């Protein structure tokens, strides 16, 4: 396999100097916990720790080389190969990682896609990875590596042989997308939607639209802007596209003027079926994930595929095998003596729009006899002075979707709990861990339970606890039955 980077290319990109003989470079990392042998380790400075503290460990784990600040290089002379990089900024190693990312972008002939949006950007990125991966070597962001270090790291990991590159770009303040879009320089840029997410950092929803619209500033001349035609901020977004170097705009949605238009969406518990017109071409496809919001974002995916000149029919077929990423709709059967309950893991993050979408998806799941639809919701963060109203306002969606019981974690989500009728209240806890035992005792065969909340509330530990408990119980029962005479 071809090395990801040669010593000469690393020195040329960074102006640095290799000390010691590097091993073959096959990847890139900033975290020794996930580092693989052959990774180029970047000793960047994080919020709490300095990566230089982990250089010896990285080299001991088989890193191909470590990128370190020039004035720190001498300390690692006997530890292994290092690339000593100059710089006068706050973090020379982060600057070097950006430089290597830019070198990767400059050398590639790949068609590059950038994705942002208030809701659904990771799922849409994964859908693009999936459908394009069936048509050629595809490189994409890992998890949600979408910030000031995630984007250059993803670029630095991109092989020269890549045919398609898919990059997720995130933000929670204005002007954060500008430098990231400039690094990625996409051929196609997609905005899934604009919603009141991170609203505490913005004066208005229009300001969020402007921040998302920054992604078009990085488009290569003649590139394609893909925009949700149904979003109320569409005029604002298209203005940003028209002010960029975009050669054209492709719109998607249910709007009659959308270029990629949904004619019919059939929602089922585990999948969706979409009848659409893609640039006047009829296309019907099955989507292996549930939820109207996912179906709508799949229209954007088809718009990107068309803009890239990739095979639309193959993309449509590929979508049937798409599965949700962990924490974004993953479904698990929980086994009981009397049957199964259904767990929907939406624990990765939360905002008003995504919780409403998840409640609607939960409403569409068929329960068993005596089964209940149970929502387990954690605080939504960064909502500013409207936070109490935004949490309380979810009560209408709970009622509309016929959710039987709601459990909440966190002081903010308690506003929702108190707005619900007593008949729909489960338990309101200060922390997510406090809900594990009550939920485990309450759940029964036939139930459908959905878990969602902002990352810092750690709703994922509820999901993991339920999976572990009922998987273990099922294994023990099966073993006992197998051993019985």
Image (spheres, rainbow, N blue to C red):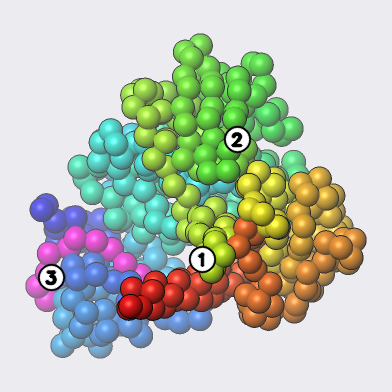
Q: Secondary structure at mark 1?
A: strand
Residue 36 image-quadrant placement: bottom left
Closest to the observer, 73 or 378: 378
**Where's the C terminus, which quadrant?**
bottom left
Pointer 3: residues within 10 angstroms few (<14), some, or many (20+)?
some
Q: Is residue 29 magenta?
A: yes
Residue 136 - label: none
Instruction: Establish if 374 lies above or below 263.
Output: below
- First-in-chain label (3 vs 1): 3
Location of residue 410 with respect to 177 vertically, above or below: below
Question: Can you tell which of label 2 and label 1 is closer to the viewer?
Answer: 1
The residue lying at 62 percent from left, 38 percent from top is 292
Residue 117 in view here: no
Residue designated by label 2: 267
Q: Nearer the viewer, residue 328 or 249?
A: 328
Is 72 above or below relative to 119? below
Residue, disc 1: 335
Viewer-nearest residue: 447 or 120: 447
Q: Secondary structure at mark 2?
A: strand
């Amino acid at each position: 396999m071809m090395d990801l980077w040669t010593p000469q290319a690393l020195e040329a990109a960074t102006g640095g100097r290799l000390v010691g003989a590097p091993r073959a470079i096959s990847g890139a990392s900033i975290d020794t916990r996930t580092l693989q042998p052959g990774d180029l380790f970047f000793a960047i400075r994080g919020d709490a720790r300095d990566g230089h503290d982990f250089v010896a460990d990285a080299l001991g784990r088989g890193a191909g080389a470590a990128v370190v600040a020039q004035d720190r290089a001498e300390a690692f002379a006997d530890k292994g190969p290092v690339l000593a990089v100059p710089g006068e900024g706050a973090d020379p190693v982060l600057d070097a990682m950006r430089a290597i990312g830019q070198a990767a972008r400059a050398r590639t002939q790949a068609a590059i896609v950038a994705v942002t949006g208030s809701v659904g950007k990771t799922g849409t990125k994964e859908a693009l990875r999936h459908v394009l991966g069936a048509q050629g070597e595809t490189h994409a962001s890992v998890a949600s590596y979408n910030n000031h270090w995630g984007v250059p790291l993803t670029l630095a990991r991109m092989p020269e042989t890549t045919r398609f590159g898919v990059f997720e770009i995130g933000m929670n303040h204005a002007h954060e997308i500008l430098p990231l879009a400039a690094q990625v320089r996409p051929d196609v840029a997609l905005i899934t939607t604009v919603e009141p997410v991170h609203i505490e950092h913005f004066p208005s929803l229009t300001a969020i639209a402007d921040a998302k619209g920054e992604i078009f500033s990085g488009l290569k001349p003649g590139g394609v802007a893909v925009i949700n035609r149904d979003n109320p901020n569409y005029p604002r977004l298209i203005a940003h596209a028209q002010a960029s170097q975009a050669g054209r705009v492709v719109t998607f949605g249910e709007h009659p003027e959308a270029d990629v238009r949904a004619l019919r969406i059939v929602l089922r518990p585990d999948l969706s079926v979409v009848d659409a017109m893609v640039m006047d071409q009829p296309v019907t496809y099955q989507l292996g994930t549930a939820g109207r919001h996912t179906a709508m974002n799949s229209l954007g995916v088809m718009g990107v595929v068309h803009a890239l000149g990739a095979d639309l029919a193959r993309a449509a077929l590929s979508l049937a095998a798409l599965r949700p990423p962990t924490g974004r709709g993953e479904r698990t059967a929980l086994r009981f003596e009397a049957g199964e309950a259904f767990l929907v893991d939406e624990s990765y993050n939360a905002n008003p729009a995504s919780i409403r979408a998840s409640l609607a998806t939960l409403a569409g799941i068929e329960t068993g006899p005596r089964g209940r639809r149970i929502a387990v919701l954690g605080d939504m963060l960064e909502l500013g002075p409207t936070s109490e109203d935004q949490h309380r306002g979810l009560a209408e969606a709970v009622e509309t979707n016929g959710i039987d019981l709601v459990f909440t974690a966190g002081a903010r989500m308690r506003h929702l709990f108190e707005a619900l009728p007593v008949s729909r209240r489960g338990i309101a806890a200060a922390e997510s861990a406090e809900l594990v035992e009550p939920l485990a005792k309450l759940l029964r065969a036939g139930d459908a339970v959905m878990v969602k909340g902002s990352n810092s509330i750690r709703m994922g530990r509820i999901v993991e606890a339920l999976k572990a408990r009922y998987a273990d119980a099922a294994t023990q029962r099966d073993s006992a039955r197998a051993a019985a005479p």
